[in-house]
Amino acid sequence: MSPYGRTTAAGKLSVPDYLRQPPRQPSAEERAALGAVADALIPPHGGFASPSQVPGFDSWLDRALAARSDAIEEVTAAALRFGAVPAEERPAALRAYAEEEPAAFHTLSSVVAGAYLMIPEVRAAIGYPGQRKHPPRFDEAVEQIMDGILDPVIERGPAYTPAP
């Protein structure tokens, strides 16, 4: 079995497995830099600790890096770059990075902020229950259909594309 998913009998990748560990463990220097970036993006405020001060941040950081295992080298390289910037200059340097390289900043900030927001105590403190299914009640579904939500799809007609 591939570490990134189940392989079907035909040898094709199926549904990916849930990964808790990144493809490689960040070094101590990379972890410190990722924590420094997280702290610059999410400083302590109103009783909330900065990410690196929250117990368990490293394990959630591993999960976030596992979720973006395709970008672990990009994320750790950027973290090392900004981890070397003096702490008082780091927020401004990250703002400039966001303007100069928005896609790279988005990847870096999503990983470190995502790790922080996955911590159960943080989620509870901000009142975020996490992603859950919220299927509509039967009467809600009927109301939405009666409101014409599917009219554009019905008007368009069938759209079937056969697989190769």
Image (cartoon, helix red, strand yellow):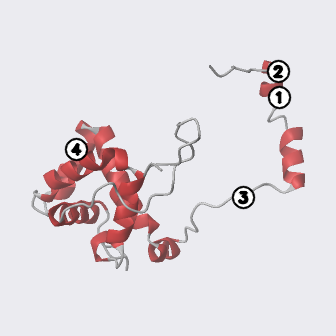
Q: CA–CA distance between discs 4 and 1?
A: 44 Å
Quick one: 99 or 112, which is closer to the camera? 112
Which secondary structure lies at badge 2? helix
Residues at marks 4 and 1 touching, judged by CB atoms closer than 8 Å? no
Q: Is residue 100 left or right of residue 154?
A: left
Task: Compare marks 2 and 3 and give the one earlier in the sequence.
Answer: 3
At 36% from the left and 49% from the top, the residue drawn is 69
Name the side, left or right, on which 4 lies relative to 139. Answer: left
Q: Nearer the viewer, residue 87 or 67?
A: 67
Q: Estimate how packed mark 3 is, as few (under 14), some (14 to 19) or many (20 or more) residues with alpha carbons within 10 Å.
A: few
Question: 89 or 130: nearer the eye?
Answer: 130
Residue to which mark 2 is pinned: 155
For marks 2 and 4, give the CA distance. Answer: 46 Å
Name the residue located 48 percent from the left edge and 50 percent from the top edge: 1
State the residue in front, 8 or 5. Answer: 8
- Residue 35: image x %, image y %? 24, 65
Task: Check contact, mark 2 vs mark 1: CB within 8 A.
Answer: yes
Q: Which residue is mark 3?
A: 134
Q: Which residue is mark 1?
A: 151
Task: Name the amino acid type tagged 4.
Answer: Tyr
Which mark sits nearer the N-terminus, 3 or 1?
3
- Residue placed farthest to the front in the image? 9
Q: Secondary structure at mark 1?
A: helix
Give the Cα separation between the discs numbered 3 and 1: 23 Å
Q: Secondary structure at mark 4?
A: helix
Q: State which quadrant residue 146 falls in.
A: top right
Q: Are marks 4 and 3 in contact (CB under 8 Å)?
A: no
Element under disc 3: loop
Q: Amino acid at mark 3?
A: His
Residue placed under numbered mark 4 in the picture: 97
Q: Nearer the viewer, mark 3 or mark 1?
A: 3
Query: For the residue carrying disc 1, how many other residues have a C-alpha within 10 Å: few (<14), some (14-19), or many (20+)?
Result: few
